[in-house]
Amino acid sequence: MALTEHKKPEQPDSGILVVNQSRPTKVNCWSCGAMRAAHFCQECGKVQPPTPVDYFTFFGLPFRLNLEPEKLEGEFYALSRHLHPDINAINSDREQQWSLEKSSQLNDAYRTLKDPITRTEYLLRLQGVQLEEQSKAATEEARRTGKIKKQVVPPDLLEQVFELNMQLEEMRMNKKMGEPDRTLERELQDSRKQLQDKYNGLLQELQAAWNQWDGLIDRAEQGGSVLEEDRIAVRDTMVDVLNRRSYLSNLLRDIDEVLES
Amino acid sequence: MAYSTKVLDHYSNPRNVGSLDKNSAEVGTGLVGAPECGDVMKLQIKVNPATNIIEDAKFKTFGCGSAIASSSLATEWVKGKTVDEALTIRNTDIVKELSLPPVKIHCSVLAEDAIRAAIGDWKKKNGQHSQPQAQPVEQRA
Ligand code: FES
């Protein structure tokens, strides 16, 4: 029910936007007994045992999608330095082991949160969305109802993807035969521009959705109530944008590959 | 990951690649995509209006080897079947026939979706509902 059903993502959360509930409660330092910070004791500085937390919590961040990359990077380097094996060489085996485990947790967390797209995907997964399963779920729905399966992207986008793939195939052939078709080449360049614009538009849509999402988080953190419909609506907008984005980014990549070959 | 020999066979020698006239009333077209990998598949069927038998099928797939093999196999399987029989083809049948590994299951799902979409398009053109028909009450002898 919390935002961070990290261990059981197959269970869709029941959707209450409770932000703090899933945070690990503060525990005392295993060594000196003082209240500890997330990774190192504030009093004696000892590394603390790893806990299975989500990546936002690992960095002590709220579940907001807008974040400052410099800050995240700074935090990453500071933590890596502290967890470095050379620094921990004089510590007990147990502490060395913890440092090692935390280091790898840190790397995963940083890699995931650093990139805006993987960060969004990750948050959606925490929200119980399984991006890989949507298509299968829609197929099952279609079987059950006997209706045509609802594609996760609009039909005209699929149409465009198909047509462009046809052109790319032709272009590849031409190039292989050593007679590139200039008209086709120009068409592809035009399409590329259009697609790039579309792509940029999608990123703006995504940014808008992020802002909405963060607004909900802020409201919840200030103790305000958040409507379930609002949460679902923003979430689904993000899923939709990401689906369309993945087609476009593949196309852009393929066009570049063909034009530059 | 090694492809099974059946996949390789369909991949290097795909059956029924091409297209049918999508404006013909006898032709149904299904265009589907897998958001996971961005692949797209088009499958078309030509149905005999008198018998509802699928007389021809063509496909064109931009995707991985398993998707190409799945759609190639799908066109082979639907040919000669009635529309309703074709609707019973499941992606699991394709997985079995081609020995697809778990990571390639979505490729076979794409083929099932494509069959369903093509049939749906044909039904729409011919004024049939794509809802499942109520099972006729069996006549007792
Ligand atoms: S990997 Fe995309 S259809 Fe097979």
Image (cartoon, helix red, strand yellow):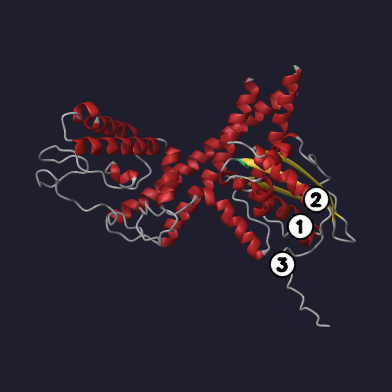
- In space, the residues marked 1 and 2 are separated at their CA atoms by 11 Å
- Left or right of residue A147, residue A110 in this image: left
Q: Residue lying farthest bottom?
A: B141
Protein chain holding label 3: B
Instruction: Mark yes or no: residue B106 visible.
Output: yes
Q: Which residue is tagged 1?
A: B86
Q: Secondary structure at mark 3?
A: loop
Reading the image, the residue beneath label 2 is B45
Q: Quadrant of residue B13?
A: top right
How many neighbours does mark 3 have within 10 angstroms: few (below 14), some (14-19), or many (20 or more)? few
Kindly identify which chain the residue marked by label 1 belongs to: B
Q: List x then y, in percent, for residue A188.
A: 68, 28
- Spatial CA span between label 3 and label 2: 19 Å
- For this rendering, which residue is in front, B82 or A235? B82
Labels 1 and 3 in the same subunit: yes
Q: Earlier in the sequence, mark 1 or mark 2?
A: 2
Which amino acid type is marked by label 1?
Answer: Ala
Q: Are marks 3 and 2 in contact (CB under 8 Å)?
A: no
Amino acid type indicated by mark 3: Pro
Chain of the residue where label 2 is placed in the rendered structure? B
Q: Is residue B88 above or below residue B45?
A: below
